[in-house]
Amino acid sequence: MTNRVIEMKEHNIKITETELEAACHYLEQQLESHSWWPKEQPGEAKHEFALMKATTSSLNFWCEKWLDSAQCKALEKALKR
């Protein structure tokens, strides 16, 4: 069995408790609308999202792991609306 190294990206997105529902809604829409989203391993990312969307700390971890900088910026923009 090989060990997979998790590469964390430096996007510094910090979803708060008040933004959690809106963030989950936005991310769910993206995952459902685009089979290629996020760009790297979308199937695994979708599975992990289902497991990690319950808390801000786990969702922030998921975002840092899976989203690129453009996707993080789009999420931040969506949360400001």
Image (tube, rainbow, N blue to C red):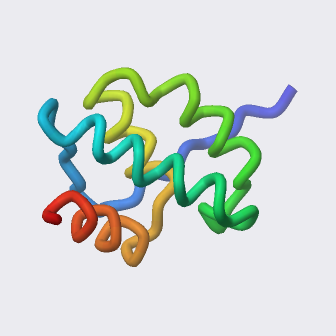
Residue lying furthest right in this view?
Answer: 1
Q: Quadrant of the N terminus?
A: top right
Does residue 17 appear left or right of residue 75 in this picture? left
**Which one is nearer the viewer's eye here, 56 or 19?**
19
**Which one is nearer the viewer's eye here, 41 or 6?**
41
- Percent x, y for residue 32? 65, 53
Q: For residue 53, which quarter of the picture?
A: top left
**Which one is nearer the viewer's eye here, 6 or 17?**
17
- Percent x, y for residue 65? 47, 49
Q: Quadrant of the C terminus?
A: bottom left
- Percent x, y for residue 48? 60, 33
Does residue 52 appear left or right of residue 80 in this picture? right
- Percent x, y for residue 55? 31, 23
Q: For residue 75, which quarter of the picture?
A: bottom left
| Residue at 75 percent of width and 62 percent of height | 35
| Residue at 69 percent of width and 39 percent of height | 4
Does residue 24 appear left or right of residue 18 in this picture? right
Does residue 21 appear left or right of residue 3 in this picture? left
| Residue at 26 percent of width and 30 percent of height | 56
Count the numbered circles shown.
0
